[in-house]
Image: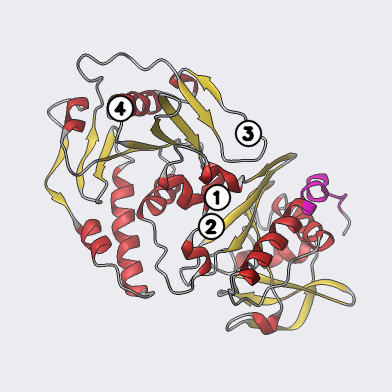
Amino acid sequence: MTEPAYPAARIVAPKIEAHFAHHLHDADRLGVIHQTQPPDADTIEAIIDAAFWASLRREESYVPKISLALVPPDAADHPMLFEHSLPLHTDKLVKLAPAVERPGIHLGVWRNETGLYVWGTVRVIPAFTMVVEVAAPGLLVVKHHRGDESGKFVNVVVLEGDQIKVVDERASSLPDCPPLLSSLLGFDSPASWVKGIDSVNVLVQLAVSMRAHGRGGLLLVVPADDAEWQDSIVRPVPYAVEPAFAELAELARDAPGDNNPLWQDAVGNAVNAIAGLTAVDGATVLTNTYELKAFGAKIARRKGSPQVEQVAVTEPIEGDVAFTVHPTQLGGTRHLSAAQFVHDQRRAVALVASQDGRFTVFAWSPCEDMVHAHRVETLLL
C-alpha cells in the first residue's frame, strides 16, 4: 500500500471485531449453523483501508463501486476463482470495479501467509460474513449477512471520511420504537437466525426503493380499519385510486411458506411501482395492509388540531443524543407536512425521503407525547 493509513479504520476495527465475536457467540449458543470465523481487528482495518482509498480513485472517470466479502473460497457457494489471486491493493480493486459493480456481486477476500488477497467473485456468502461496501467516494458500509436466503444484510458501521457511525443494536428495544425501525436494524430478528423464514419486509423495501429514485418522496402508512386519515387530506385528491390498488396486499397475504424467488420478484416489482409514485409532488397513501389509496395527495392540518411545533429527533447510532426541533429544521415542506400528519393521525406513520439521501420515519411517541422523527439513512445504505 502506498497510501497513508486511513485513521478511521484503525479506530473502528476493534468495535467491529467485538460485534462479530458477540454475534457468532450467540449463534453458537443458539445452535445456528455457520461457517464463519470472527475477523480480527488487523484484518478488518486492512480491508477498510484498501476500500477507502479505492473509493477515492477513478477508473475512466467512473467512481468505483466495490463490495468486499471476507470469506475463504471453500466456504463460498459457486465461487468464480481467479487462476492467480491478486493482492488486496487499491489499484487492483479499482481495475476490477467495473466487473463487479452490479448489486449482489462480492470480491472474495481471504488471508494467506503473505497477507490478504482477492481470490475471485461470489454471489452467495455464508451467514455472518463481513462485507465492506463502497457506497460513494469516501463512504463505506460495513455489514454482515443476516443468515437467511433472501440475501439481506445488517449494517454494522458507516464511515464517511473521518465520521464514524456505529449502528446501535439496542435502538430496537427502546420504548416506542416503530416496527419499521426494528426491521431495518435487523438485530435479534427471527429471520436473522432461522434459515428459510421469509424475511421480506414490505415497508423496508419501500423505504429502500423510495430512497433509490433520488427525487425525494413522502409515503403515508394509514390504518386500514378506519378512514380518519382523510380528515388530514385536501379534497379532491388529484390521483385518488378507486378501487384501491391491491397487488402488493395480495402478495403479502399469499406469502409462501418457504423462500420463493418468483414471489420475491413479484413483491419487488410491486414495491418499485408504488415507490415510484412517491416521486410525484404530494403524498402517497398506503394502508397498513399495503393497499394503495392515492398519490399526489396534499396534507392539511386537521380541523381543530394545533399546528405541530416540535418533534423529537434520534438516529440509531451509538452516542446519539435525542434533541427537539421545529420540524422545518429537518427539511422542507415534506418534513413539515409529515410531522403534522402524524401529529393529527397518531396511528399513522410517515416515511420521508430527501433528494440528498436522508430518510426520516415520523411516528407518534406516547412516551414523549410528541412526534418522533427517526433518522434512518444509515440503515438504508
Magenta highlight range: 3-14
Residue 315 lies left or right of residue 46; in this view the side is left
Residue 185 in the image, given as x and y percentages of width and height? 53, 50
Secondary structure at badge 3 equals: loop
Residue 212 lies left or right of residue 90; in this view the side is left
Q: Which mark is residue 188?
A: 2
Q: Amino acid under label 3?
A: Asp
Q: Which mark is residue 381?
A: 1
- Nearer to us: label 1 or label 2: 2
Secondary structure at badge 1 equals: loop
Q: Amino acid under label 1?
A: Leu
Front residue (pair 292, 272): 292
Earlier sequence position, callout 4 versus callout 2: 2
Q: Amino acid under label 2?
A: Asp
Residue 121 lies left or right of residue 15; in this view the side is left
Q: Residue at x 42, y 70 (%)?
A: 197
Residue under circle 4? 341
Cα separation, mark 3 vs mark 1, equals 19 Å
Cα separation, mark 1 vs mark 2, equals 20 Å
Q: Amino acid under label 4?
A: Phe
Q: Residue at x 66, y 77 (%)?
A: 35
Local packing at callout 4 (Cα closer than 10 Å; few below 14, some 14-19, many 20+) is many
- Observer able to see residue 213: no
Which of the 4 quarters of the picture holds residue 342? Answer: top left
Above-or-below relation of 231 to 309: below
